[in-house]
């Protein structure tokens, strides 16, 4: 369990609630719903926890939306975020506007819908390969056999990385996102940067049509990119797209395995996937990134001091009943499913279109081949991205098709 930090003097006792984002999902069946019930009943909407270095936590949709837009107060710059002070600094996520905007433009073409749609054939092939590898055995450990492999295979295709580096890349991503010690998380970021620096060097000499070549040869409107900026851009593309997809798809398959009537509904009527997927994403939001207070100020009656850390608890924010009716339930026929699983404001996820295509294609291909399955065992993990760490599924092989 994380040590308890002394509560700073500017934090009033009534705003303190003991909460550990590493431990909160552990041992739960549906962490988003169970933790939301607890926090909505017992904690203030914006509270301070003395765990994990001490930080503020936001659990309501409206607060999170507003804080996401107030980058004049709640900053992404490394100087206000201890966690981010490690090589390489990662644009665009570790900058505020106006710098942020220039860096984001560099990545724009690689994540535009046309670029992603061009990849959909490859994405489908990779999905089918992974599903066929397990369908005949009647069981799988979904996280290690599918969810760790699928987004990595897609990323590796996007950057044209050598196949033999897969396990190394995955282990670094997991360390970066889950290691309880900040020093280990920073070390993983630096190791990843060093690895990508070598690949970027190669692409600068010999560019192809992959995203690393785009970064290696890109510049800003008014100047060249520095080496560290190029490495940082490549590093965030890597970290942004791995664990988030892994976690979201594992949660969704856990849910569908536990709710066979809803899964059958999708199998019988695949047209429901489009809207259904959005509500599945809302109820299974995973990502808990933070901001740092850029100066001393008062916001919604709360005193913040320079460097205070403010975390968006998105897994819980998706369940906010003030935003969504019957917010704990997944419904395939909602007119719209508003959520902050992909963030909001200038840092809104640049990979959200890709992520949705990956999830939709994988689900379509799984449904075609495995029309019923059940959950045998699940273990939940906490951290910056909440996720099932183990998810054992099984099905009747006689019902499968190739
Ligand atoms: C289901 C999957 C995904 C989820 C839930 C997710 C979630 C998020 C969230 C919440 C943010 C905003 C963070 C903040 O404001 O602090 C974000 C930003 C970002 N995401 Fe994703 N993401 C996913 C998939 C991807 C993929 C597939 C990629 C790329 C391959 C990606 C790349 C990025 C990048 C580069 C940013 C930073 C954008 C900026 O600062 O302007 N994400 N993501």
Image: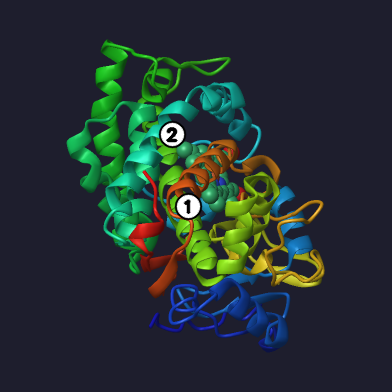
| Residue 107 vertical position relative to residue 274 in the rendered view, above or below | above
Rendering coords of residue 131 (x, y %):
36, 47
- Please identify the quarter of the rendering in which residue 205 is found: top left
| Image region (quadrant) for ligand 1 | top right
Identified at 44% across, 40% down, the residue is 236
Q: Secondary structure at mark 2?
A: helix
For ligand 1, tell me if the residue under mark 1 lies within 8 Å.
Answer: yes
Q: Is mark 2 within 8 Å of ligand 1?
A: no
Quadrant of the snapshot with the N terminus: bottom left
Query: Which residue is at the front of the view, 371 or 359?
Result: 371
Q: Are marks 1 and 2 in contact (CB under 8 Å)?
A: no
In front: 157, or 199?
Answer: 157
Q: What is the x, y in percent for residue 23?
A: 44, 78
Q: CA distance from mark 1 to mark 2?
A: 17 Å
Quick one: 88 or 179, which is closer to the camera?
A: 179
Is residue 206 in view from this perspective?
yes
Occupied quadrant, residue 145: bottom left
- Earlier-in-chain disc, 1 versus 2: 2
Helix, strand or loop at mark 1: helix
Residue at x-position 25% and y-position 37% = 194
Q: Is residue 175 left or right of residue 279?
A: left
Q: How is the image coloured?
A: rainbow
Expressed as whole percent of the image width and height from the top left, the position of residue 188 reads 29, 51
Residue 159 placed where, x, y %?
A: 35, 28
- Left or right: residue 387 compared with residue 334: left
* Numbered mark located on residue 244 in the image: 1
Q: Residue furthest left?
A: 164
Q: Which residue is mark 2?
A: 123
**Side of 96 where 126 appears, left or right:** left
How many numbered marks, from 0 up?
2
Disc nearest the viewer among 1 and 2: 2
């Amino acid at each position: 369990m994380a040590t308890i930090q002394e509560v700073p003097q500017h934090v009033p006792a009534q705003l303190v609630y003991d909460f550990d984002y590493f431990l909160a999902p552990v041992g739960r069946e549906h962490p988003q719903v169970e933790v939301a019930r607890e926090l909505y009943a017992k904690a203030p909407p914006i509270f301070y926890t003395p765990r994990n270095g001490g930080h503020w936590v936001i659990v309501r949709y409206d607060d999170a939306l507003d804080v996401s837009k107030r980058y004049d107060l709640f900053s992404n710059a490394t100087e206000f975020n201890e966690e981010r002070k490690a090589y390489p600094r990662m644009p665009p996520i570790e900058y505020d506007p106006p710098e942020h905007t220039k860096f984001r433009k560099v990545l724009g073409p690689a994540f535009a819908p046309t670029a992603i749609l061009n990849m959909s054939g490859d994405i489908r092939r990779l999905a089918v390969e992974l599903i066929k590898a397990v369908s005949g055995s009647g069981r799988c450990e979904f996280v290690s056999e599918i969810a760790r492999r699928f987004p990595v295979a897609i990323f590796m295709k996007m950057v044209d990385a050598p196949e033999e580096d897969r396990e190394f890349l995955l282990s670094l991503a997991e360390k970066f996102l889950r290691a309880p010690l900040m020093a280990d998380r920073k070390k993983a970021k630096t190791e990843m940067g060093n690895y990508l620096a070598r690949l970027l060097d190669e692409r600068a000499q010999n560019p192809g049509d992959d995203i690393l070549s785009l970064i290696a040869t890109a510049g800003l409107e008014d100047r060249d990119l520095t080496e560290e900026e190029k490495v940082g851009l490549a590093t965030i593309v890597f970290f942004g797209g791995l664990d988030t997809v892994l976690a979201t798809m594992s949660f969704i398959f856990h849910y569908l395995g536990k709710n066979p009537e809803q899964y059958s509904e999708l199998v019988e009527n695949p047209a429901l996937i489009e809207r259904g997927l959005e509500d599945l994403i809302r109820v299974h939001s995973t990502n808990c990134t933070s901001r740092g207070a850029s100066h001393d100020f008062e916001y919604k009656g709360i005193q913040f001091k320079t460097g205070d850390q403010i975390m968006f608890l998105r897994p819980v924010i998706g369940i906010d009943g003030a935003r969504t009716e019957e917010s704990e339930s997944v419904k395939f026929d909602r007119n719209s499913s508003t959520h902050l699983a992909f963030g909001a404001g200038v840092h809104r996820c640049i990979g959200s279109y890709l992520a949705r295509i990956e999830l939709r294609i994988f689900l379509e291909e799984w449904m075609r081949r495995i029309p019923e399955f059940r959950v045998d065992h699940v273990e939940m993990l906490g951290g910056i991205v909440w996720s099932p760490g183990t998810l054992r599924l099984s099905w009747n092989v006689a019902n499968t098709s190739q």
